[in-house]
């Protein structure tokens, strides 16, 4: 059967005891989504309005927040409608769209974090050349690259998965993902695996940039107290975001690749949701609380006075 001829209807995982706790689930998901929207947009609006924040580090931070909202919007509206309608079904075309949004956001987050690591390297290790290296033109190019490359990678992966002939119609997850769609087909997944390895190699290059940046950053911090202060103030949130991102990806791979039957049900639900809950919530909180200049604007109640710009 050709999947492109008309949209097939797929079923998604039903939350545990959804009938009994439907209103609680709906309230929790709605609160999380509204919180993600409010904290991320608050941070972005402050960066836009405050002239002193028109620096590469804060511009990349705003991009990270926008990306978090984009990824969350691929999950929460669908989940909320499923809880209201008590209908955990999705068409194959909408499943492909949801997969694209969530996973393009995921890979974009990694590329943005890579750009941010380069920014911290330039700011601490090459302070005299910082504004020469990271001009407005360079920042625009880095931002475009951190969006275009992941989106191109994901759209081809989604097309390869969605053009396969499905012989199963249930996704054992609360949302669609690429590997779950691949597993719906009874034909060989060789091409999908090869393409997955190609994408992995591309993003391993990003990992190399991050590691190299931090090796140089740590070396620079050994020789300067001022560099150490900058490192702990601006690089620590970045490190926490990277660790958070790494665990989210590992959890998702564990869940998608190795199946749900070998994992306890409570852990299955956590693994299914960690990717779409933790990063968009934690990233703005980390930067909002850790970087003093941001904290005074975004969370004024945490400080006794505000900065006048």
Image (tube, rainbow, N blue to C red):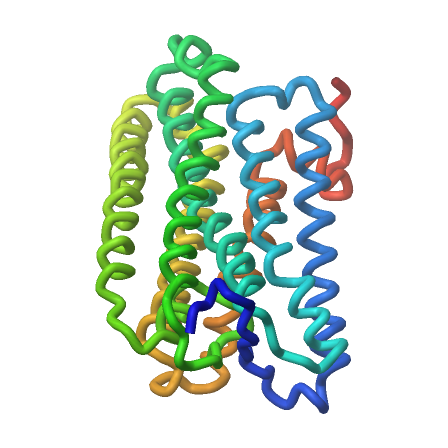
Q: Quadrant of the N terminus?
A: bottom left
Above or below, 226 relative to 22: above
235 or 108, nearer to the observer: 108
Q: Quadrant of the C terminus?
A: top right
Residue drawn 43% across the image and 49% down it: 155
30 or 129, nearer to the observer: 30
Residue drawn 72% across the image and 33% down it: 45
Above or below, 254 relative to 211: below
- Image location (x, y in percent) of residue 12: 55, 78
166 or 96, nearer to the observer: 166
Give residue 14's quadrant in the image: bottom right
Residue drawn 77% across the image and 43% down it: 301
- Image location (x, y in percent) of residue 16: 59, 87
- Image location (x, y in percent) of residue 208: 25, 38
- Image location (x, y in percent) of residue 204: 26, 44
Above or below, 109 relative to 224: below
Above or below, 33 relative to 11: above
Q: Is residue 269 left or right of residue 40?
A: left
Residue drawn 47% across the image and 80% down it: 169
């Amino acid at each position: 059967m050709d999947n492109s001829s008309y949209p097939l209807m797929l079923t998604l995982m039903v939350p545990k005891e959804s009938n009994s706790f439907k209103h609680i689930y709906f309230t929790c998901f709605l609160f999380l989504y509204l919180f993600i929207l409010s904290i991320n947009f608050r941070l972005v609006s402050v960066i836009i309005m405050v002239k002193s924040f028109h620096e590469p580090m804060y511009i990349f931070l705003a991009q990270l927040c926008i990306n978090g909202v984009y990824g969350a919007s691929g999950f929460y509206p669908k989940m909320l409608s499923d809880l209201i309608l008590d209908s955990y079904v999705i068409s194959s075309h909408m499943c492909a769209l949801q997969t694209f949004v969530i996973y393009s956001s995921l890979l974009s987050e990694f590329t943005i974090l890579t750009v941010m690591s380069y920014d911290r390297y330039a700011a601490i290790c090459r302070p005299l050349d910082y504004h020469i290296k990271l001009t407005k033109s360079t920042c625009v190019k880095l931002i475009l690259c951190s969006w275009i490359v992941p989106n191109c990678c994901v759209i081809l992966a989604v097309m390869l998965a969605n053009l396969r002939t499905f012989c199963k119609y249930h996704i054992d997850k609360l949302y669609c993902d690429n590997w779950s769609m691949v597993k719906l087909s009874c034909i060989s997944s060789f091409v999908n695996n090869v393409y997955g390895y190609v994408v992995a190699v591309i993003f391993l290059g990003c990992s190399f940039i991050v590691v190299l940046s931090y090796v140089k950053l740590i070396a620079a911090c050994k020789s300067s107290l001022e560099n150490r202060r900058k490192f702990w103030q601006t690089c620590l949130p970045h490190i926490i975001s990277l660790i958070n991102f790494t665990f989210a990806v590992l959890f998702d791979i564990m869940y998608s690749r190795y199946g749900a039957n070998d994992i306890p049900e409570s852990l299955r639900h956590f693994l299914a949701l960690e990717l779409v809950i933790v990063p968009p919530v934690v990233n703005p909180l980390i930067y909002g609380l850790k970087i003093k200049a941001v904290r005074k604007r975004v969370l004024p109640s945490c400080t006794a006075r505000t900065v006048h710009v």
